[in-house]
Amino acid sequence: MSADLRLEGVSLTYRTRRGALDALGPIDLTLAQGEFVAVLGPSGCGKSTLAKLAAGLIAPTAGTLRLGDAPISGPSRRTGVVFQKPNLLPWRSVLQNVLLPAATLGLAPAPAQARSAQLLELVGLAGYADNYPHELSGGMQQRVGIARMLLADPELLLMDEPFAALDALTREALTLELQRIWSQQRKSVLFITHSIPEAVFLADRILVLSPRPGRIVEDYRPALPRPRDPDTLGLPEFNAACHHLRRHFTHA
Amino acid sequence: MPDTRTRRGGALLPAPVYPLISLAVILGLWQGAIALFAIPDYLLPRPAAVFDALVQGFVTGSLWPHIGATLAEAVSGYVLGCGLAIVLGALLAESRTFERFCYPVFLGLQAMPKVALGPIILVWFGFGMASKVVLVALVCFFPLFVNTINGVKRTDPELLDACRAFCASRRYLLLHVKLPAAAGDIFSGLQIGVSLALIGAVVGEFLSAQRGLGYLIASASVSMSLATMFAGVALLAVIGLSGSLLMRRLHRRVVFWEGAARGERE
């Protein structure tokens, strides 16, 4: 299952001691069902804020957000999240961490158990159910986070720079893996990143944000076939897309 | 296969042996000083005399009621004070109103020596065990209370956001995220509490008691029986040390992820 995400005139202004600080927007954006949209922007442009707004963790100063037919008024079981840090509970085993949404959303235990086993398999951690987060590498911890995100079968995935803290090789491996997982699950994805190749490789559409307050300055569709695999990285179209997007950032 | 690299700095003996050697040296210096400076028994007893007093006390059984009384007061006061500190600390950490009005007051109270309230507590709770338990609870309460509040409030906001995004309720966040996250701070408070509990019990017994190691020391002071006083002090040291070690073990076992995250090994 997947749902469309719609933002209309969404902006966020922080009130500080020095006065109002415009953090984001106004932003209009429509993310179609099953679409993978990457948001690319410089540091501090408010892209993480965008993810938090879509997750219902903060409310916009102006504008409306809708997921499918319902307005977003707070966290929802229809949304799954992964952040830059894995944010696992260190006192819980891998399996218990994946099952967190089952507890917080009140899912039936038996199907949730079965699903968590499948998901651990999907992210390549089948043998690690009883390990604790500190026993895993950063990349493995983030895989646990991905399994947790998928547990309640959400309709929208929000991924806020999920691979930014990982080393380059792990990052590449996980990007490939996410592509594989997404092609199996076909969820709507809002993927925040500051990596151009990552955005081009994964996304159907790439939204480029301006520096603060972040606004969409380009809505770009790379002309790349699916399914994508390591060979995609060698295509001239891939390099052309990266080159095209890089123009936005080279003057910095 | 034994790993010869694990002992730090080329240690030859198991770690607990070293402090025992230090202790033996201290006892030796003590004995030597008495012989060298001809210190009379009524000022500083010989280590052997203290040892005799201990053996005598255990053989005749006269020490047991004192040990039992002090332990009972310290343990029940500790459990009471620490339990209240954790429950109240967790609840009050969640309340903005409390934070604004009461937290500074509690910080001020923490700076006040609670044992100064001993005589007042004696008036309110009588001369029996109850007043000692209350005094112990009071001295144990504050550090743990403040630690619990700080620990709960210091929970990684990103971790909380991640759990909130999965619709975790406030109650769930407190019980399953914030309190476990505060476990390290809570255990530091529990550790401090062990020695404070003994201080509270002994001060209570100094003030007024018929039993207890504090009473034993105070009454031996009247008869200038220094060996007995030193025996009481030694017993308190042993009890305090055992309690601390026990709590440290428990700390490592319960909050297993913190030591492991730092790369420590048992």
Image (tube, coloured by chain):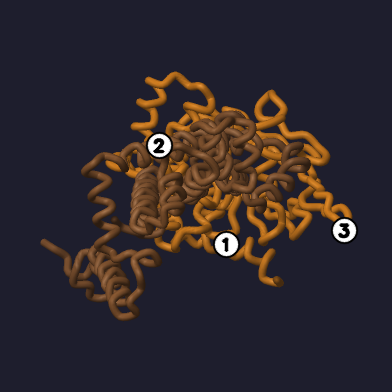
Instruction: Mark 3 vs mark 1: give the one in front.
Output: 3
**Count of numbered badges drawn on the protein:** 3
Tell me the tag on residue B69. Answer: 2
Residue A178: in sight, yes or no?
no
Residue visible at 62% across and 37% down in the picture: B121
> Which residue type carries mark 3?
Arg
Q: Position of residue B214 (x, y in %)?
A: 45, 47
Q: Tell me where residue B64 sits by quadrant.
A: top left
Point out the image quarter for the C terminus of chain B. Answer: bottom left
Q: Position of residue A103 (x, y in %)?
A: 48, 27
> Which residue type carries mark 2?
Ala
> Which residue type carries mark 1?
Cys
Circles 1, 2 touching at the beta carbon (< 8 Å)? no
Are tags 1 and 2 found on a single chain? no
* Label 3 Cα crowd, 10 Å radius (few <14 / some 14-19 / many 20+): few
Distance between the alpha carbons at the discs numbered 1 and 2: 77 Å
Tell me the tag on residue A18. Answer: 3
Distance between the alpha carbons at the discs numbered 3 and 1: 38 Å
Residue annotated with mark 1: A242
* Label 1 Cα crowd, 10 Å radius (few <14 / some 14-19 / many 20+): some
From the viewer's side, name the closer residue of A160 and B50. Answer: B50
Chain ID at mark 2 = B
In orange, which chain?
Answer: A
Q: Position of residue B202 (x, y in %)?
A: 48, 46
In brown, which chain?
Answer: B
Instruction: Mark 1 vs mark 2: give the one in front.
Output: 2
Q: Is residue B225 above or below residue B136?
A: below
Tell me the tag on residue A63. Answer: none
Q: Is residue B86 above or below residue B49?
A: above
Instruction: Mark 3 vs mark 2: give the one in front.
Output: 2
